[in-house]
Amino acid sequence: MASKRVQELSTGLFFAVLVKESGPLESEAVVMVVLNQAFDVLVLRYGVQKRIYCNVSALGEPGGGRGSPSHPTPEGCRL
């Protein structure tokens, strides 16, 4: 089990270095899990799963309209 975990961490570290050196990447992803202030996506091109955190206070007024916590905008989200 330890070797599997080390492999996963190595893959995550490599991906982080790739993104840091290449700059922002644009790719299709599938939402796997939706949480209160975040969601998990599977980035199809790279085969990695990442959690995207949303700044709920920057998303607009409560009430369910576009830009609300139930419909976050990309500007209010980060990895």
Image: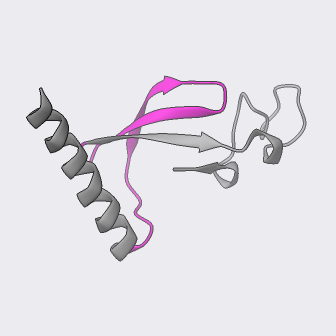
Q: Is residue 47 left or right of residue 34?
A: left
Is 3 or 55 nearer to us in this picture?
3
Q: Residue at x 79, y 43 (%)?
A: 59
The reply to whether residue 37 is visible in this rendering is: yes
Q: Can residue 46 be spotted in the picture?
A: no
**Which residue is located at x 13 percent, y 32 percent?**
2
Residue nearest the observer in this picture, 57 or 71: 57
Question: Is residue 40 shown in magenta?
Answer: yes
In the foreground, 3 or 47: 3
**Residue at position x 41%, y 59% from top?**
26
Left or right: where 31 falls relative to 73? left
| Residue range (magenta) | 23-47
Residue at the (21%, 50%) spot, across then down: 11
Q: Quadrant of residue 24?
A: bottom left
Asked if residue 16 is positioned above or below residue 41 in the image, the reply reads below
Where is residue 23 shown, x and y percent of the image? Answer: 42, 73
Is residue 57 found left or right of 30 in the rendered image?
A: right
Q: How is the image coloured?
A: one colour
Rendered view: 45 above or below 40: below
Please identify the quadrant where the N terminus is shown. top left
**Foreground of the two, 6 or 40:** 6
Asked whether residue 42 is drawn in magenta, I would say: yes
| Label tally | 0
* Residue 12 drawn at (x, y percent): 28, 50
Residue 29 in picture, x, y percent from top left: 39, 41
